[in-house]
Image (tube, grey):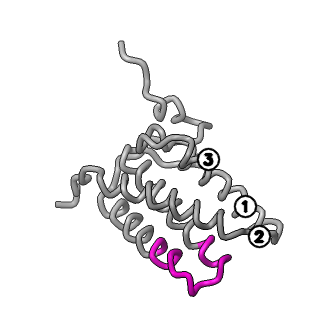
Amino acid sequence: MTSPSPLERLAGPGNVLAKEPPDAKEFEGLVRSGHARLTDAENAANSLDSRFDLAYSAAHAFCLAALRHHGFRPSKRYIVFQVLPDTLGLGPEVWRVLSKCHDMRNRSEYEGVLDVEDRLVSDLIGACRRVAAKVTGLPPIPDESK
């Protein structure tokens, strides 16, 4: 008898993940969106706040793509960052940056407070690049519509 994977232990009624077969088109769309937003986040002509928003959105798209690739859908936005060790083999040096930025994004969205610095945006973009590289290296999802 094999024990459930860490992702499977987080799945089920009332938990933060639900099992759902991966979808090739959804995966490709998330990756495409992530790359477009990461490119814009790297543009120093954009304001620091915009670069933060774009890099955060890119990171979320890539992390969601990785989770969907494994056949799970989150019920909470933050979980896509916390399961990076299980979806992409990335450690705390990546997911902690993304988790911190998630908290900042929430403060901005719900309290109107966004106080980002160059260093944080740089760290966020670096973490996002690492996630993007890993997601890009995942094997293709079979397209069930063919």
Which contiguous range is marked in magenta?
A: 37-53
For mark 3, what is the residue? 96
**Which tag is nearer the camera, tag 3 or tag 1?**
3
Instruction: Give the alpha-carbon distance from disc 1 to disc 2, as whole Å.
Output: 7 Å
Observer-nearest residue: 130 or 59?
130
* Image quadrant in which you'd find residue 47: bottom right
Q: Earlier in the sequence, mark 1 or mark 2?
A: 1
Comes first in the chain, label 2 or label 3: 3
Local crowd size for mark 1, using a 10 Å CA cut-off: few (<14), some (14–19), many (≥20):
some
- Residue 75 placement (x, y as % from top left): 58, 49
Q: Which residue is mark 1?
A: 104
Contact, mark 1 vs mark 2 (Cβ under 8 Å): yes
Q: Residue furthest front?
A: 119
Say which amino acid is labelled 1: Met
Q: Hey, which residue is sitting farthest bottom in the picture?
A: 45
Badge 3 amino acid: Arg
Residue at the spot 42% in from the left edge and 43% down from the top edge: 87
Residue type, numbered disc 2: Leu
In the rendered view of the protein, which quadrant contains the N terminus? top left
Q: Nearer the viewer, residue 27 or 21?
A: 27
